[in-house]
Image: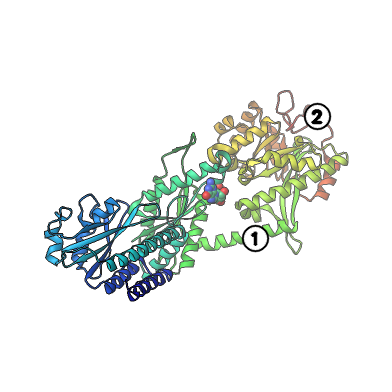
Amino acid sequence: MDTNAKTRIQGLQNKVLEAIATGTSLSAVAELICLRAEALAPTAICSILSVDRTRCLRALAAPSLPVAFSTAIDGLAIGPCVGSCGTAAYRGEPVEVTDIATDPLWAPYASALAVPLGLLACWSSPIKARDGQVTATFAFYYRTKRGPSDLERLIVEACVHLCTIALEQDEIQKHNDQLAHFDHLTGLPNRRRFNDLFHSRLDEGAAFGLLVADIDYLKTINDTMGHLVGDSAIQEVATRFRKLGQTATAFRLGGDEFALLVDGCRDHAALRETAGTVLAAMAAPFECDGNMIVPQVTIGGVVSGIDGIEAGVLRQNADFALYHAKEISRGGYCSFEQGLRTSITDRMQTIRDVDQALIDGRILAFYQPIVNLRTAEIVGLEALARMRTPDGRIISAGAFQAALSDPKVAYSLTDRMLAQVAHDVRSWIDLGIPFQHVGVNFSAADFSRDELENRLAAAFDVESVPLKHVILEVTETVHMGGLGNTIAKSIERLRSKGMLVALDDFGTGFASLTHLLSFPVDVIKIDKVFIDRLLTDRPSEIIVGSLIDLAARLDIKIVAEGIESAAQQERLLELGCTLGQGYHFARAADVATTTRLLQCFAQKNPSGASTALSARSAGVGSDCLKAS
Ligand code: GH3
Ligand code: MG
């Protein structure tokens, strides 16, 4: 071969490699290879076909062949007798057909396809990936009945090599795109892809709805059944979302959060209907690692145009709706409403305030006495959180209650309270006060990690305070909430270790006495709303009276909350309730005031049969909670 030909082949190689290196698309590179090869071999017509995963030929580049010819070949399955290219791909070796009209390999296609176009001979070479799989073919067609020349062999050799590189590069590119746009765990398109589509829908002014969904209690699933089961829950939810097909396009935004784009949706009613379909898809349980799990999700939704036209606002409003749904309708759906923005941003501010107060040490334990209604002696305390503002005001828990919807804040607040309560109880014991017990409030967040027993033990160990001085106070919603009643089980475990559990705010939640039989507690605290109406509302009096009788028979102690008058105190005593708390006796006060109160009014003989809060077993009077 003359040096001129060599140089020209080298020129072809350089040009193509440069195109690959600069990220030119596979089809454009393939076309460039064809045109350059044809320039070097003017009597040849070049065609590159790829072989897809289903082993069918796909037209990649054939710039000098009629489109109809390429279209006819596209989709043919490779095989032992499929022209030159289909056969070369099948055999994995070059196929030289010097007379298409008579060669049996071309029998089905010669007269219908090639010969009428003047294509009389075809030499096809397979292009192989590193693993030996044929991924494409490179062919020279001739208008005369002949085989390739020596120069053409060299050109094809160079081109096959270049095609291998281009195809490999394309695979890498596709793989990178997959990684960049699709989630590894679920195979769903990811946040980036969602953002692209979301913005382009908005740019087009298209009508669409957006649902954001978050799996409920995934942390609990991880903690109780293991991370792999948690992964399976995410995958299962993704699979169910994918099966929604045209109804909504699902994306995994990250963690256990998903987005669903509902094209064509124009109003809240339509979006609510779609959300209903999504929720219905979650109903069936699935099995994983021997556990039966119902994959519950909560969904918030917005409609483009109605709830915002700007991407950031619309997306944030969807989050607000989800946040709201998590609070009022777990496992359900809420659509965005304008009022949500203010209420949620207010709450966020409160969360930030409490978070800062925790950092600054401005969360304080105050104490309200629980008294013997007969003697007004203090038999115990309830610890109540207070926040001191930077300017020194004391804010009661009701005013920053909203912050406790944030599990992290709620958890840290309990830690802070436990440390202070343990410290204060130590000081009372050291002062020789016959201290009995203090109730500490716990939220659902405190049960979210399976370590409450250790946290309690650690906090009180530091001050060498025995846990018998602590009563775990939980509300009905906490007690009955949680995945598969894990909270109730955790409470039962703590009880079995001898700790007392009080059900706080009884009557305001959803608990029934039947629940109490399945998940017993030691103390019921009747909510203030019943005490408020005790003297004026006959049904309230009947409820309180029956509750006191029933509790006595179940060996559960009763504490009345929010007693504000001597008349209420007397009526409660007549009904058989001997323990209570409220402004009539004392408001919650700081540790110094509480110390003075305890020094003056603490029940002197807690172990006496009728004057303590603390017996779980029979034989101890009803106006004590705990046997010493
Ligand atoms: P909620 O009911 O309020 O939604 O709380 P949650 O327990 O589901 O927790 P949240 O939505 O606040 O946070 C998501 C949790 O999901 C955090 C993390 O523990 C867990 N998680 C995030 N990504 C993965 C993952 O890829 N695999 C597993 N197993 N868990 C994950
Ligand atoms: Mg979640």
Kind of residue at disc 1: Arg
- In the image, 105 versus 48, the foreground residue is 105
Quarter of the rendering containing residue 272: bottom left
Residue 535 visible? The answer is: no
Q: Which residue lies furthest to the top in this view?
A: 619
Q: How is the image coloured?
A: rainbow
Please tell me which residue is depicted at 87% across the width and 41% down the height of the picture. 430
Of label 1 and label 2, which has the lower sequence position?
1
User: In the rendered image, which quarter contains the C terminus?
Assistant: top right
- In the image, 501 versus 452, the foreground residue is 452
Judge left or right: residue 501 versus residue 540.
right
- In the image, 397 versus 499, the foreground residue is 499
Q: Which mark is residue 352?
A: 1
Label 2 crowd bin: few (<14), some (14–19), many (20+), radius 10 Å:
many
Please tell me which residue is depicted at 66% across the width and 49% down the height of the picture. 411
Q: What element carries label 1?
A: helix
Q: Position of residue 357 (x, y in %)?
A: 71, 58
Q: Is residue 211 above or below residue 477?
A: below
Q: Is residue 169 above or below residue 186?
A: below
Residue, disc 2 = 607
**Separation of marks 1 and 2 at Cα, in angstroms:** 45 Å
Q: Residue furthest bottom?
A: 4
Judge left or right: residue 526 versus residue 181.
right
